[in-house]
Image (cartoon, helix red, strand yellow):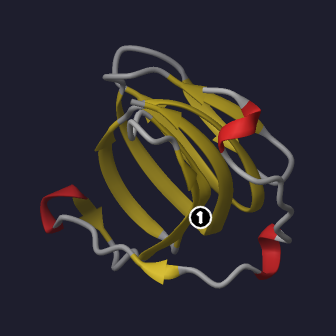
Amino acid sequence: MTTRDHPSFAVHIPDAELEPEPLDPEQIVSGNPEVTGKVLWESADGKQVRGIWQITPGVVTDTEADELFVVVSGRATVAVEGGATLEIGPGDACVLREGDRTTWTVHETLRKAYHISL
């Protein structure tokens, strides 16, 4: 990927309008969390994705991709199976490894900007 294969842009993340991204019911451990998001850019081969993602309070499980994200608002505890428990909130940068099995306990609606490598 080069910086020449897409235009430069700026997005005000707190105000960006997001679209529903339904969760697989098997991922929901408790509560009624809802996910929304917006892909801002995707590489031509689909292996790099940048965007915004948001989840309302509840507890969900996931298997992660290789991801770097920065929390814009909200708070959550992310427990990595066999690894660390991460307390994340506004301004925190987080790296998750491909294949990490995680449990997200979302305390306050969490919004993040992310870059995923598939």
Dot 1 alpha-carbon crowd within 10 angstroms: few under 14, some 14 to 19, many 20 or more: some
| Residue depicted at 18% across the width and 64% down the height | 24
Q: What residue type is labelled 1?
A: His
Q: In which quarter of the image is the N terminus?
A: top right
| Residue depicted at 41% across the width and 33% down the height | 47
Query: Is residue 27 depicted above or below 14 in this figure?
Result: above
The answer to whether 49 appears left or right of 62 in the picture is right
| Residue depicted at 34% across the width and 79% down the height | 32
Measured from the top left, where is residue 107 in percent x and y?
Answer: 59, 64
Residue hosting label 1: 107
Q: In which quarter of the image is residue 99?
A: top left
**Label 1 element class:** strand
Q: Who is closer to the viewer here, 51 or 87?
A: 51
Q: Who is closer to the viewer here, 20 or 5?
A: 5
* Residue farthest front in this picture: 4
Q: Report how many numbered discs are placed on residues in the image.
A: 1
Q: Quadrant of residue 3?
A: top right
Query: Is residue 32 depicted above or below 83 in this figure?
Result: below
Measured from the top left, where is residue 23 in percent x and y?
Answer: 27, 68
Query: Is residue 91 depicted above or below 64 in this figure?
Result: below
